[in-house]
Amino acid sequence: MIEREIAPHLRRLFEQYPFVTVTGPRQSGKTTLCRAAFPDLAYANLEAPDQRQFAESDPRGFLAQLGEGAIIDEIQHVPDLLSYLQVLADERRGNSLFVLTGSEQFQLSSAISQSLAGRTALLRLLPFSLAERERIGASLTIDEMLFSGFYPRILDQRLEPRQALGDYFETYVERDVRRMGAIRNLTSFRRFVRLCAGRVGQLLNLSALGSDAGVSHTTARQWLTVLEASYIVFQLPPYHANIRKRLVKSPKLYFYDVGLASFLIGIEHADQVVTHPLRGPLFETMVVAETLKYRFNRGLQPNLSFFRDSRGLECDLFYETGRGIGAIEIKSGATIASDYFTSLHRVAALIPTISTKTVIYGGATPQSRTDAEAVPLKGLRDVLDRFESAEVPPRAP
C-alpha cells in the first residue's frame, strides 16, 4: 500500500477542524486512505445494514459507542446523523473529532452545508494519479493507461480491467442508481452512459445526447446530474473573458476515470487503443483528469477551463492562477509537429493574461521552443508545479 498524495492535507485539516469530509467515487480508496491516516480512530461503515439501522434508530447511542472520535464511512446513507454530529461538536468545542466519507457529492454537500457549515473541511479523492500509479508499479504505457484506468483496486490487485470495470459499472447501476431512485429504465440509462463515453472531450449537447439515447432533453439532464453526483463524469467549463470574440457557452464532458470510458465504448484490449478513433479524446480525458487530481490532492478547488470561440479556435485547457493562465494543448501523438503550437499562439494573442504555453503530448522527450514547450505526459506534474510557483519554463538556447 502506498501513501496517497492527499494524505498530508487530510491530517493537517483534521487538526484544524472538528470534521473532515472526504468525498469521491466508489473504489477511489477513501476508506483505505482514512484508516491508514488515522489508525487509532474507531471505524463505522454505514453501508453495513446493522450499522445503518443503529445510526438511524438511535443516533445518540450510535455516536456514543464510537468514543471520542471516529471514521464514519458513507455518511450519505444517514444524512440526519449530521445534525447530531453538529451538536456533539458544539458541546466538545474541539477539533479532530470525526472523519466522514461519502460517494455522492451533491446530496452530501447539501446536507453538510445545512448541518456542518464552518465545522468541516472538504476534500475530494479521485482514483490514483499518474505518480501514484507509478509508485504501485503499474504500467505507464499510454495505451495501457487508457485501457486500464486508475482505480486503485484494479491496479493493486492486478485485476483484468475489462472484467473489473464491467463489474464496477454493473454494481454502480444496480446499487447506486437504483438507490437514488431517479431512474426507472436502467437499460436506457446504460445506453445513455455509453453514449456519454463516446463523447468525451466534446462540447456537451444534451438535446443531441438525449435524442440518441431515446429520452427527452429533461431526462438527459437529470441522468447527467446522477452521473456527476456519483463521480462518474464531470463538466469542464468554458473560459469567459471580455474580448471581442464570441466564445462558446457549452461545457465539455469528461469521465473521472479514462479506463471506465474506454470500457464503455467497447475497448476490450490495450492493443485496440492505438488505432481507436477516440484515442485522442481519451488521452485528453486522462490529461484533464490528471490536472484535476493535482488540484484535489492538494486540497485546492478546481481552476480549470477551456477556450473555444465561435469559429473553432480552441485551447484544450486553461489553468488559472492569480499570476496568469497556463495554456495547455493536448496531443496524443508521439511525434511533435509544428502545428501542435498553432492554436496556442493564436489563443495567446487574444488573451494577454496567458503566461505559459505548453503542449502535453504522447511522446517521451521534452522540447523547448522560443515561447512554448512540449512535455510528455509524465512531465505534466512539473508543468503544474511551475504554474503554481510562477516559474518561467526553460527556453531554447
Image: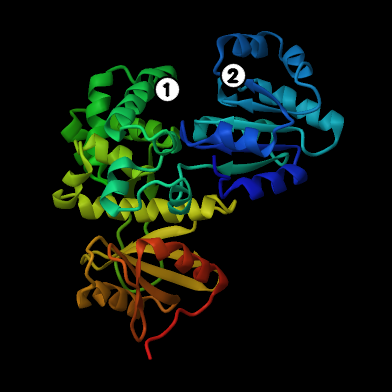
The first of marks 1 and 2 along the sequence is: 2
Q: In the displayed structure, does residue 237 sit left or right of residue 283? A: right
Q: Which residue type carries mark 2?
A: Leu
Q: Which residue is mark 2?
A: 46
Q: Which residue is mark 1?
A: 176
Question: Residue 302 appears at what percent x and percent y?
Answer: 50, 54
Residue 389, above or below 38:
below
Q: Quadrant of the rendered structure where residue 43 is?
A: top right
Q: Quadrant of the C terminus?
A: bottom left
Which residue is more in the foreground, 232 or 113?
Answer: 232
Q: Quadrant of the rendered structure where residue 19 is?
A: top right
The crowding category of the residue bearing disc 2, from other C-alpha atoms within 10 Å (few below 14, some 14 to 19, many at least 20), is many
Q: In the displayed structure, does residue 283 sit left or right of residue 153? A: left
Observer able to see residue 336: yes
* Residue visible at 80% across and 26% down in the picture: 88
Q: Which residue type carries mark 1?
A: Asp
* Residue visible at 53% across and 50% down in the picture: 296
Question: Residue 259 appears at what percent x and percent y?
Answer: 31, 41
Q: Nearer the viewer, mark 1 or mark 2?
A: 2
* Residue visible at 32% across and 41% down in the picture: 148
Question: Residue 348 appears at what percent x and percent y?
Answer: 35, 77
Q: Disc 1 versus disc 2: distance between alpha carbons?
A: 14 Å
